[in-house]
Amino acid sequence: MTTTLHATDVHPAWLPDAAFEPVARRGAVLVVPDGAARAGVDTDEVLDALGAEIDALGPYDGEPALLLELSGGGPVEGEESFRLRRERGRLTVTAGSSRGLLHGFFHVVRLGDAAFTGPDADESHAPAAALRMLDHWDNVDVHPVMGQVERGYAGGSIFYADGRVREDLSRVRAYARLLAAVGIDRVAINNVNVHAREARLLTDDLGEVARIAAAFRPYGVRVHLSVSFAAPMTVGGLETSDPLDEDVRAWWRAAADRVWEAIPDFGGFVVKADSEGQPGPFAYGRDHADGANMLAEAVAPHGGLVHWRAFVYDHTQDWRDRSTDRARAAYDHFAPLDGRFAAEVVLQVKHGPLDFQVREPVSPVLAAMPATRLALELQVTQEYTGQQKHAVYLGTAWSEVLRWRPWGDAGASVADVVAGAGGFAAVSNVGDDRFWTGHPLAQANLYAYGRLAWDPALDPVDILDEWIDLTFPGAPDALRAGLHLILDDSWRTYELYTAPLGVGFMVRPGHHYGPDVDGYEYTPWGTYHFADRDGVGVDRTRATGTGYTGQYPEPWRDVYESLETCPDELLLFFHHVPYTHVLHSGTTVIQHVYDSRFEGVERVERMVRTWESVADLVPVDVAVRVRERLAEQLRSATEWRDQVSTYFLRKSGIPDEHGRTIY
Amino acid sequence: MTTTLHATDVHPAWLPDAAFEPVARRGAVLVVPDGAARAGVDTDEVLDALGAEIDALGPYDGEPALLLELSGGGPVEGEESFRLRRERGRLTVTAGSSRGLLHGFFHVVRLGDAAFTGPDADESHAPAAALRMLDHWDNVDVHPVMGQVERGYAGGSIFYADGRVREDLSRVRAYARLLAAVGIDRVAINNVNVHAREARLLTDDLGEVARIAAAFRPYGVRVHLSVSFAAPMTVGGLETSDPLDEDVRAWWRAAADRVWEAIPDFGGFVVKADSEGQPGPFAYGRDHADGANMLAEAVAPHGGLVHWRAFVYDHTQDWRDRSTDRARAAYDHFAPLDGRFAAEVVLQVKHGPLDFQVREPVSPVLAAMPATRLALELQVTQEYTGQQKHAVYLGTAWSEVLRWRPWGDAGASVADVVAGAGGFAAVSNVGDDRFWTGHPLAQANLYAYGRLAWDPALDPVDILDEWIDLTFPGAPDALRAGLHLILDDSWRTYELYTAPLGVGFMVRPGHHYGPDVDGYEYTPWGTYHFADRDGVGVDRTRATGTGYTGQYPEPWRDVYESLETCPDELLLFFHHVPYTHVLHSGTTVIQHVYDSRFEGVERVERMVRTWESVADLVPVDVAVRVRERLAEQLRSATEWRDQVSTYFLRKSGIPDEHGRTIY
């Protein structure tokens, strides 16, 4: 395990050659019965890729132990399931579609030796949800403020360079392969904030988009485009974007026709409308169902989708006005529209009511729209969770969201809500960085996202084991234990040293890295904590606050409403309390602020020590990069501890019970 | 007074045609005795420009009442004085140099009718200081964060567009004329933060710089360049910039030789070294005298200057460390070097110890370096004083600095300190905006800077009258009164609604516009207020604080040291006091915070009403632009009032005595 990779090589992530060794050692064969591979937009190419994967395993003498068989009936549109039978150490994977077969192949790779050594079995596998997408917030041009990849922490875009689509898309193909190996099957390739240059992807640059789609296609990944609601005006030259205007509708239909002509397996459009300055239907007195359904009409003939984001709120609110509550916005805008969206519309809902904070309650929108196709939006890129400078494993956080039951223990979970025709969308954390994700350990987040989107019931710690097995083949126990020590609880660690008790934000405005307790306090963004000399927190109760608790069904509307029952970790999200308020944990709010900040830093110090104890068990480039990032995490965590503690000591005047240094 | 100018016209500022009418009506003639115009680098061109000015007055029948005469002895290098004699309504201006004659001509224009109607007189005029420079922080390329003009609030650069020097420099010539009319005679044409593109001005682009110099030359204005201390490495290809290295010294000598060969009347170099990330002599264990003297050696043969900035401090300090005091830095770095700088070096010292805040004490460096040539650095561009969105007349602020006497009433003033061979440098507020300065009333600041640099004894309110007479010829009394109501006390008004009692900053980090009380509180920039629930302010006393008061001579070292004698307006700059501390004014600190914020906004409301009462007395384009800016000033002042008041109410818990709304 001391291989030194050349600095110019791209790190293989969870698909190093060694990960295929258990299959290669036993041999594999692809069987495609005559007539099975019906002519289709991608079937042949997926089968070609699968064939190439098997060829790459190397020649095998004797009878292969893995048989991959496309079943005779021909591929079924959208069908991704596969059947796996194990009989005395021999595996047969069958599927009705090339994509299903691809999933089955990578399933076997993931299992490694265990795929072959288990007892005889006959299993069926299928994804829990149809839609498992990654959103890239990549710009073609480098944005003067946001850079090339908005909220990207892994270098430039893998799609674009020098103001256009890259000539060499081999990196995109490698990415498609990584995604296929974890079950992600859709990628939106440009920023939801669609700037002028990026708007042309839909028109002049369709040929270039087709090239990207071709790089993804062999691994069964479909391409989507983010589009601007104002495109009929900005690129179409019309005088309106009114969704009920017939010329506008015709323009979108024609635009969709052109896209699908160029890319027959194109996925659809992603739209951020009436959000943070982006254009939308409100300008014409229309609602978001009007807007989304207009696009649905355009994509419907092609079997396409419209991912419509529910991230709509007033980003120019007055901090003096405590009655406006950003947390309420998505529900207030969208819940009344339930049942009005066309079948092609997927409403993409952020997991929490604010914006990917380290701790938020689950968005009540997810429980309010039973007649709407919903996608849960997660953020793999660590905008508010350490920006891939901090090791923060998000699988545990997402799993908590997925397992949460809006209607109480007897009701459905969030995973159930988005299952079936709905699904997942998540902001990618990938760039042209050699490790794909800047922080090598942040690869685990991309991996976990794909796996949870396929099967939300998976244990996030088990997913880490899968990832370790693939990424560090033959990992010694010490390495495995070290990685678990560092990652298992790292989300909670990050929470400990940053904003306390669910209050959120307290980050530097703009870039969102590092602490600034009052950074957003007097801004128009609606992200406040209202700390004064007596207390802190946002009163979102029905009794005395903004009424946000009323957006939840029973039992949560009452659990969150009451100080007696509100969970500690969300206390300041729902309530404004004195610093001396005693938590369920038995400590006061102010003492919790100090204790958790100090504990968070101590945990990071342990992470640093743990890494030093295992770093020589990984390739030196990984060892060095992780060491460098952990040093920054420790510096930053210390800064968080000191700023937050100092801020609240200066404000409350209540000293730390343990007499630690606060400035 | 209802002339509508075309939107594409450039506003004439203080030189509208009508300003010349009192001279034109009486006629003027230029007399250059044979042999007087000795061949010189700029003499002839200045005389040509002066001749053109007189031609532009139009034909005059009869005996002209203004005689401009170059005296016979030929021009004296650097001589700018002129003599003015009035005899029964006829004026004779004589000067020993073309520049002196130009100053005399614009002196007469400024006086208007009064120049001719006064009693007989015989006066000599000369500038108080030799150096009266404007620094442009213009970039050739548009900087991704700072834009084209760093801290510029008046559009793009008048020198550069599209990544190079503009083809059409007629705007530069018009600028030179405006400057000549107020006595400014030197302009540094690029940002003191010298980026890669701008570094080439010194080498490849010298021909372009020569074109700019040619545009300035007819009006007697010399061009300077900001240079990077690292230029021997970054553009010269050497391996060091060590100022004691002979190759480095030779490189600078050769660079200077090339510059003066291209531009014989070139002014010299401006250097920001070891400051906010710019390279400097510290990297080689050398001090700033070593660095500056190396450049002095290079410019000396050409009669050039080195403007070396004293703005050196640690911009990566730890907010936890209260012993480091940014205010001390310039003195600590430079006072020990007094007497070591070469004659060509002009040490450029910001007026206060921090950074152009609305209220600072005067920099003690100005009283600590009797053996050094000093230039007082002011900021005409309103970085911290409203960014040309707020009407803030800075003449009063600068006058206070100039009249301040570091050694007490019997000693010299700041104006005395920089008189003679020293002088003034100020950051320009000009861009390619139609009004030159964004806010039309901000033209008054540029005007006042030039006039105060020529004669620091001028009353800043009288200067406003001059400016009104020229800019709004024939201004009715109501307009004059309105402009005085708006501008005379506007600096104090801005102080009233922004950071209180000299504590400074409290602005949004980065762009520096608008309030953010804790914006810099936990940053590395050394700009803190240390507000907690009990009090606020920075203890800079010798007794218990950073010892900064000890940098002043008597009496100020003791005046500032004592709470009894420290002026209210600087209280929080020098002392950390409880909110209940009673000011000399009789009110408490906390009540002062509230009262002054509310008074500031009321004053802005009066400014708005005043403008509405006089707006139809000015050209409509001026009326509209000022109205728009005043609306923003009122919005911003209200935001300042509410944020600062709310911040301190939340922290102190002490309510406003008058029960006004605080959030």
Image (tube, coloured by chain):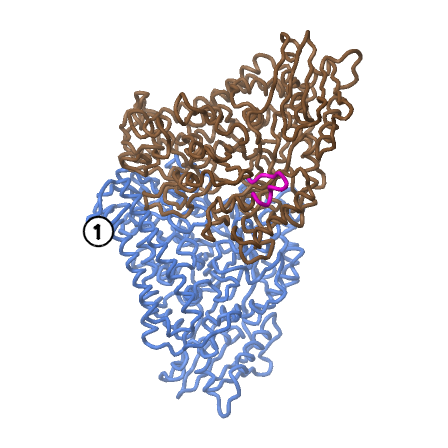
Chain colours: A blue, B brown
Q: Residues within 10 Å of mark 1 (few under 14, many from 20)?
A: few
Q: Type of residue at label 1?
A: His
Residue B38 horizontal side relative to residue A627, left or right: right
Identify which residue, A302 or A485, lies in the foreground.
A485
Identify which residue, A170 or B476, lies in the foreground.
B476
| Residue drawn where x is 31% and y is 71% of the image | A481
Give the chain letter at badge 1: A
In the rendered view, would you say B85 is above or below A115?
above
Q: Which residues are magenta?
A: B296-306
User: Judging from the image, what secondary structure is the residue with disc 1 in?
Assistant: loop
| Residue drawn where x is 40% and y is 32% of the image | B499
Quadrant (top left/top right/bottom left/bottom right) for the C terminus of chain A: top left
Q: Position of residue B171 (x, y in %)?
A: 68, 34
Q: Which residue is mark 1?
A: A584
In the rendered view, would you say B71 is above or below A568?
above
Residue B552 horizontal side relative to residue A163, left or right: left
Magenta includes B660? no
Q: Position of residue B448 (x, y in %)?
A: 55, 25
Point out the residue furthest to the bottom here: A62
In the rendered view, would you say A214 is above or below B271?
below
Q: Position of residue A428 (x, y in %)?
A: 48, 60
In the rendered view, would you say B6 is above or below B260?
above
Q: Is residue A42 visible?
A: yes
| Residue drawn where x is 57% and y is 36% of the image | B135
Residue A607 horizontal side relative to residue B496, left or right: left
Q: Kindly indicate the quadrant of the structure image that contains residue A85.
A: bottom left
Q: Position of residue A599 (x, y in %)?
A: 27, 56
